[in-house]
Amino acid sequence: MTSEESEEGTSVESELGGCRPMRADARRNYARLVTAAREVFAAEGEGASMEAVARKAGVGVGTLYRHFPRRIDLVESVYKIDVDELMEAADATMALEPWEAVVAYLEAFVRYAQSKRNFLNELREAFEKNPDLRLDSRERIDAATDRVIRRGQDEGVVRTDVHGADVTQLLAPMCTSATISPEQTARLLPLILDGLRKISVTEPVG
């Protein structure tokens, strides 16, 4: 048995559906690997190697493959963490004024969606292999977006003829398109926000 095997044992069985909980060292390695994968995928895209992820995480390749036997397993884990962070961003907007919350959440959504551009094909493969992953994530994202938008509508700062799903359908293709640069997205987002904002019309005095 190698030192890596003795450190983690079979703790990864829990993450893969077994009954044993992951030990503390295995949990740390899992988190380091996912964090490293996000950085490596962002920098190198679909050409990033698993070895590069392991090096970035500071663990051996054997440790990586015990947590993620297939590359697609790692892609799924990165995606799940990204969705979780977007949900946290939606929760955090509740402390802001309604319109500021809309702006902050859509900016967070743009960052989330743009981060998928470099491994979009692999993510589509993951969705094909696990349709529930896409369905569950879309439902969570649409619900979070709708919550932010509805709050703005209730407070009279967002037009009332749109739903959260409308907004995500508008933004997602723009963020993941290879023909639209991040600079263009930064210019287009304010236009979308302007379209969402409810303008108060006042009668002229006199």
Image (tube, rainbow, N blue to C red):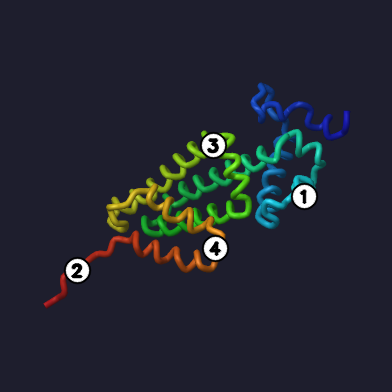
Q: Secondary structure at mark 4?
A: loop
Residue 136 in percent (x, y) is at 49, 36
Residue at x 66% of width, y 21% of height: 19
Give the amino acid type for the residue marked by disc 3 in the picture.
Leu
Labels 2, 3: front one: 3
> What is the quadrant of the C terminus in the image?
bottom left
Q: Earlier in the sequence, mark 2 or mark 3?
A: 3
Give the amino acid type for the residue marked by disc 4 in the picture.
Thr
Front residue of 93 and 2: 2
How many marks can you see?
Answer: 4
Q: Earlier in the sequence, mark 4 or mark 1?
A: 1
Graded by Cα atoms within 10 Å as few (under 14), some (14 to 19) or many (20 or more), the crowding at tag 4 reads: few
Q: Earlier in the sequence, mark 1 or mark 2?
A: 1
Give the amino acid type for the residue marked by disc 2 in the picture.
Thr
Labels 4, 1: front one: 4
Q: CA distance from mark 4 to mark 3?
A: 27 Å
| Left-right relation of 7 to 17 | right
Q: Secondary structure at mark 1?
A: helix
Location of residue 20 (image quadrant): top right
Q: Secondary structure at mark 2?
A: loop
Q: Which mark is residue 52?
A: 1
Residue topped by disc 4 = 179
Give the amino acid type for the residue marked by disc 1 in the picture.
Ala
| Left-right relation of 155 to 76 | left
Q: Which mark is residue 133?
A: 3
Residue 53 in percent (x, y) is at 75, 47
Graded by Cα atoms within 10 Å as few (under 14), some (14 to 19) or many (20 or more), the crowding at tag 3 reads: some
Q: CA distance from mark 4 to mark 1?
A: 28 Å
Compared with 4, 13 (above or below) is above
Residue 54 in percent (x, y) is at 77, 45
